Amino acid sequence: MADLRRTLRQFQSEAPPSGKPARKTAETEKAAHRRASVRAPGRRTPAAALEAPPGLAELPADAPDWMLKSRMLSSALEGTIAQRDPGPRLKACIERAWAAWELNGLTDKQIAKVSNLVMRAHRAIRETARSQLNRAIIDCAEILHAGLPSPLKRRTRFELVLDVVRAVRDEADADAAMIAGTMRLCGWSELMREAAAEAIRIALEEYPPVSSVSNR
């Protein structure tokens, strides 16, 4: 992370001088207050990344949170590119950001279709009598699997859809069932698991657990 901070400082220090130092105005004071009010960036996104890299316009004084976060993220990404080989931690950060941005390559229309299918399956299976439950779970899973968007259906095992239907049957809250089922069918749960496993692995490599047994 020290390397990224140093790269970003060098990256920003290459901006051409602006001549006389600017006077403090109401707008600049407001901008400073606005930046101070934003949640502090994490250790992977230095606060210095709020500054505009060369060639990019300064953020407006009343920049909303999404704009400030966009600047921090884009500056941090440019910093990793400048390093050529930023190391495994930052590469893993980029993979996580890309996965979150792309959402497994699904469109909004496809996501909505999956969510609607899960909601209908939840309603149908929750209304099924226990005596008919086993057959109903299979029927619901078959309908759900058949209705998935083609790219998703090709890579989704029927056994996974069965598990999703069983899980939504046990969830009384319709919204919670819809979100959990959609995440699993879209592959987001697995994406998050892989990203979390990689983040944990990298963190433990840098900060290995201390043995509770003292070596004497």
Image (tube, helix red, strand yellow):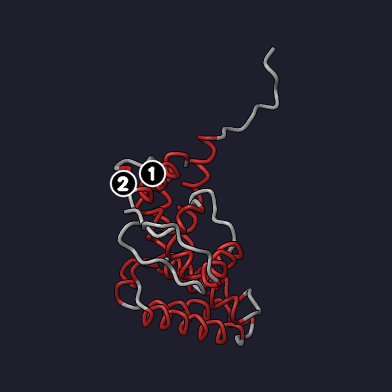
Element type where label 2 sits in the image: helix
Residue 41 horizontal/vertical position (percent) = 54, 56
Q: Residue type at mark 1?
A: Thr
Figure check: 110 above or below 36: below
Q: Quadrant of residue 173?
A: bottom right
Q: Which residue was labeled with disc 2?
A: 82
Which residue is drawn at the image coordinates 46% and 46% (left, top)?
198
Figure check: 151 above or below 43: below
The number of numbered discs placed on residues in the rendered structure image is 2
Within 10 Å of the Cα at label 2, are there few (<14), some (14-19), or many (20+) other Cα atoms?
Answer: some
Relative depth, front residue between 62 and 101: 62
Q: Residue type at mark 2?
A: Ala
Which residue is drawn at the image coordinates 32% and 40% (left, top)?
85
Circle on res. 7: 1
Q: CA separation, marks 1 and 2? A: 7 Å
Sequence-wise, which precedes: disc 1 or disc 2? 1
Q: Quadrant of residue 34?
A: bottom right
Task: Report if the CB atoms under discs 1 and 2 are less than 8 Å apart.
Answer: yes
Element type where label 1 sits in the image: helix
Residue 158 horizontal/vertical position (percent) = 41, 69
